[in-house]
Each structure stands twice: as C-alpha cells, then as structure tokens.
Amino acid sequence: MLSTNLVGSKGMNERQIQLIREIREKSVLLFWEESFGGMAYGSLHLRRVHRIAEFIWEKEGGDEFLIRAGAWVHDVALAHGHDYDPERVAVLARAFLKQFQRLREDERERLVACAEGHESGRDSSILEAKIVHDADALDKGGLLGMVRHIWKMTNMLEKRILEDEQDLKKLENHLMERQDRLYTETARRLANQLKGPVDLFFHDRPFALKTMIWVSRLTTQGIIADMVAEELVTRSDHPCLRRLKDQLECGYLDTP
C-alpha cells in the first residue's frame, strides 16, 4: 500500500499541510475524470510519483512542500490533452493553481515550473522541478513503464493493437530514452534497479513480443495500465516480472 500520510512532515507548516491535502484531492479527481478521456480512472500514477518524489527529497533535499505539491500537480495539463508543450503546460498549471487562494505567488510559480518541466526537463535549474521530473520518469520506466507505454501506444499514439518487432523496437527505444534523462543521483540509482528486469524482458524476444501483443489487446478493453500490470504478474512466472509487483507498490524504494 502506498502511503500519503503527512503526519511528521519535517519542513511544512499547517497551512502547507492543508494545501497539500486540497491539491491532492483536486489533482487526483482531475486526473481520473479528464485525463485520456477518463480512461485513467483509478490509476495510482500520481500517488506513486508522490511517493517516489518524497523518497528522492529525503536523499537530495529541497523544499518538501513544493516537491510534494509538485508531484500531485505535474499532470494537470493531461486533462486538456497532451502535456508535451511546456508553454501550454505552464498556462494550464497556473490556471489550475489559482483556485488555491492560500498558495503564495512564489510557491505557485515554482509549482508551475514542476509541471512545466516534468516531461521536457525545462527549467532544470530548480531542484524541486528536477525531483518531480525524475519521480515521474521512474514511474514511467521499468516494467511498469513498459505496460504504461504499450497502453499509450495502443490507445493514443498508434491507435491499434501492437503486433510486430517494429512496434517492440519503438517500445524499447522509448524506455531507454526515459532512463537517459534523469537529474538526481538518487533517481539514477533507482533506475539501475529497474533496468535489469527490462533488459531481461527485451532479451527474451519471443516472450517480449507475445507479452506486448497480449498487453496491447487487453488495453483496448478499457482496462487501466495498473490493472493490466497486476494481471501480468499473476499470469506469468517469467523472471523479469518478479520486480513488477514491487514497482506497483514502490517497494523497490526500500531496497538497498
């Protein structure tokens, strides 16, 4: 189970703790109901990114409030379509954050930077933006990232069931690029833990191709990536899948 308990937070005052709770509630509801046309309802992506960001903050430092809040708001632009255009993301994030009247202007702008750079890495001079970027990239990496990107390719990018070696190569290239764009040492160490199972997956080409096709077909039935990943863990005992359950629960964060 992924905890979002704020009790005992080291660097936040009561105003910030309450704001985090409000931002979490609004962000999750927006993500579930609007992102990908409502097809992400029930996804724990935001919760995992928050947990990963919290872990990186504990190792790398930074402003706890901005990192926690930034983790919740990083995907608000998805409610309005894709989130690859930094300028558009900034406008949408700023509009979303205006509803929180107790948020200071300087806090709002730094949270906008967290959202703006979570895909592109833009404004990487801000530590909090780096950490949110890395937390998001880690949840989109590893075998969970593989399942997530098959879902995205099937339903949004290719708009068809994936079926051949060319599709598998696109999937592999995407995951490799994700790992190459990390800022913090903690994130790079965590990515190395997730890389082994991915390498094992793609090394077994027949299994990888068969699994990609199975996952792609399942995602056309309106099943979210989290549930597809959970089903994959139960249906196969391939060695590469042993860490997938850990990734779903962020258990790998506690591995030395």
Image (tube, rainbow, N blue to C red):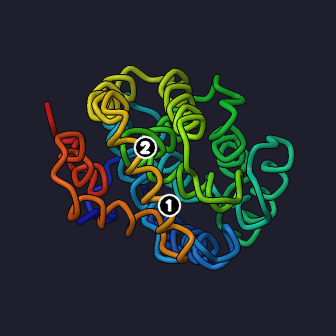
Residue pictured at 63% horizontal, 51% vertical: 153
Q: Quadrant of the N terminus?
A: bottom left
Pick the front one: 141 or 197: 197
Q: Is residue 20 above or below residue 48?
A: below
Pick the front one: 43 or 175: 175
Q: Are marks 2 and 1 in contact (CB under 8 Å)?
A: no
* Residue occupied by mark 2: 209
> Label 2 is placed on what type of residue?
Leu
Q: Of the residues under marks 2 and 1, which one precedes in the sequence?
A: 1
Crowd band around label 2 with a 10 angstrom C-alpha radius: few (<14), some (14–19), many (20+): many
The spot of residue 64 in percent (x, y) is 44, 45
Cα distance between the residues tagged 2 and 1 = 47 Å
**Element assignment for label 2:** helix
Label 2 or label 1, whichever lies nearer to me, is 2
The answer to whether 105 appears left or right of 57 in the picture is right
> Label 1 is placed on what type of residue?
Gln
